[in-house]
């Protein structure tokens, strides 16, 4: 579904509004007018296939309750929804990326979200996702999240033609990228314009830092060490900068977006990009010639060979506690979590192979299962270390600055520590008390 962008004066935000059509069966509010719920989200918060909007139309036909989508670019959404929640102007339903550490601070659920604990559907969600949508033993969010793993996907034909194999360390990664560049193809699609994409390399490889220094996550959470003290993180940033300087991300790559990367990869203009399991379906649906032409491997930055697992890592829907339409919000959540509708979201999404509802059968292929069994796994940094996820976009901006030459790798890490300290003080974290 195409989104139309609206510019707002003096603000950072571009809104795209998709209005769900009217139904002849009106649902009436207290004033007798039809109820239309507002649904605020970022671009990657709902599938680009438009399945959620399509289902909302059917929900309206069935109930008479309309849904108006307000879709904001990823780079601006976090700041916008925080401001909207603080001012009491948040949409009736809002999407927020969740994990157990950052959700309470980002959502402030006791103040802003409808308590869903007694809803029947809560008992059907995966126990893995519940900590990411819960606070103080109460459940506030609804998610369709897969268990999130970010792999490097590669074009098998390009690799075969050049006689190269998937790398298992940085030097191999660098070597094959040079061969791909020499062939006239962009080796690796980097998307700094989306702000979060470049941050994946730094934090999704967190299990490797923990493996090399057991207890590192705990030390960071207890403020017993700084991010700037982690030599392997500095090394990852230096490697990313080297890729940029050697042209492995392509020319003028700072303006690249995630969405454009799917097209570049599908057309064979880029040999590698980072995505989640199920990407094969999304790409081959748009580019049939790519069917069975995609392989994957773990991100080898910093010689990483550990699979990073994010038990949350995707958006969850929250109902606005201060909305005038709480019952209609609950009706929408109940309808969207019916078994047949969960299956519809799963089948009509972007090709995810898992969903956080055990009643829906996984689509993981033997190739994925075998790969996971052959590699160690660990929790990604932003889901295990305090005050990392809330600054994901800020770190992305700093990495873009590093690519442009305005920041050094050391300064990127120092900025992360500064923001962690600021957030810890706001939340009165005793580990940061002087």
Image: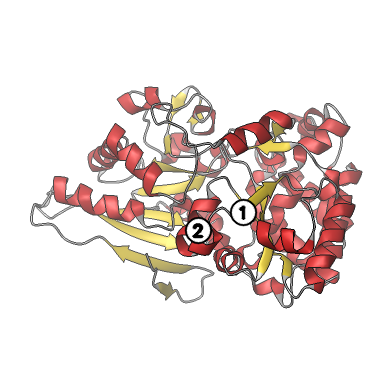
Residue at position x 74%, y 77% in the image:
251
What crowding class fits label 1: few (fewer than 14 Cα within 10 Å), some (14-19), or many (20 or more)? many
State whether residue 364 appears in this view. Answer: yes
Image vertical order of residue 243 relative to residue 227, above or below? below
Residue at position x 39%, y 72% in the image:
4
Regarding mark 2 in the picture, which secondary structure is present there? helix
Report the disc number at residue 294.
Answer: 1
What crowding class fits label 2: few (fewer than 14 Cα within 10 Å), some (14-19), or many (20 or more)? some
- Residue 183, horizontal then vertical, whole percent: 78, 73
Depth check, front residue: 187 or 67 = 187
Image vertical order of residue 298 relative to residue 72, above or below? above
Question: Is residue 337 found left or right of 10 in the rendered image?
Answer: left
- Residue 151, horizontal then vertical, whole percent: 66, 47
Give yes or no for contact between labels 2 and 1 (Cβ–Cβ under 8 Å).
yes
Question: Is residue 400 found left or right of 332 in the rendered image?
Answer: right
**Which one is earlier in the sequence, the residue at label 2 or at label 1?**
2
Residue highlighted by disc 2 = 284
Question: Is residue 411 found left or right of 327 in the rendered image?
Answer: right
Give the position of the C terminus as an image quadrant. Answer: top right
- Residue 61, horizontal then vertical, whole percent: 15, 51
Report the disc number at residue 227.
Answer: none
Disc tally is 2
């Amino acid at each position: 579904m195409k989104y139309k962008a609206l510019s707002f004066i003096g603000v950072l935000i571009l809104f795209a509004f998709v209005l769900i059509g009217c139904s002849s069966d009106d649902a009436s509010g207290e004033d007798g007018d039809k109820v239309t719920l507002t649904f605020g989200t970022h671009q990657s918060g709902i599938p680009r296939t438009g399945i959620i909007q399509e289902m909302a139309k059917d929900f309206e036909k069935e109930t008479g309750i309309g849904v108006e989508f307000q879709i904001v670019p990823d780079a601006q959404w976090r700041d916008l929804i925080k401001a909207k929640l603080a001012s009491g102007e948040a949409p009736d339903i809002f999407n927020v990326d969740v994990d157990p550490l950052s959700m309470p601070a980002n959502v402030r659920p006791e103040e802003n979200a409808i308590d869903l604990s007694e809803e029947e559907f809560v008992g059907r969600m995966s126990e893995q996702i519940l900590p990411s949508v819960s606070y103080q033993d109460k459940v506030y969010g609804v998610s369709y999240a897969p268990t999130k793993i970010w792999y490097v996907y590669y074009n098998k034909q390009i690799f075969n033609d050049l006689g190269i194999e998937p790398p298992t360390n940085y030097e191999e990664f660098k070597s094959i990228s040079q061969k791909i560049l020499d062939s006239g193809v962009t080796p690796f699609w980097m998307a700094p314009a989306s702000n979060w994409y470049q941050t994946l390399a730094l934090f999704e490889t967190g299990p490797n830092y923990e493996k090399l220094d057991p207890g590192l996550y705990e030390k960071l959470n207890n403020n017993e060490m700084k991010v700037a003290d982690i030599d392997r993180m500095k090394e990852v940033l230096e490697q990313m900068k080297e890729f940029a300087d050697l042209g492995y991300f392509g020319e003028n790559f700072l303006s690249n977006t995630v969405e454009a990367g799917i097209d570049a990869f599908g057309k064979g203009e880029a040999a590698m990009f980072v995505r989640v399991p199920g990407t094969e379906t999304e790409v081959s649906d748009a580019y049939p010639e790519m069917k069975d032409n995609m392989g994957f491997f773990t991100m080898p930055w910093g010689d990483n060979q550990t699979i990073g697992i994010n038990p949350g890592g995707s958006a969850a829907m929250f109902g606005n506690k201060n909305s005038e339409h709480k019952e209609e919000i609950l009706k929408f959540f109940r309808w969207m979590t019916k078994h047949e509708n969960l299956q519809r979201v799963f089948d009509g999404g972007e090709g995810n192979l898992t969903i956080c509802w055990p009643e829906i059968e996984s689509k993981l292929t033997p190739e994925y299962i075998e790969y996971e069994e052959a590699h160690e796994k660990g929790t990604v940094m932003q889901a295990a270390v305090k005050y990392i996820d809330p600054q994901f976009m800020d770190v992305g901006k700093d990495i873009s600055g590093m690519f442009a030459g305005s920041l050094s790798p050391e300064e990127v890490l120092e900025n992360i520590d500064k923001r962690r300290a600021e957030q810890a003080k706001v939340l009165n974290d005793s580990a940061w008390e002087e």
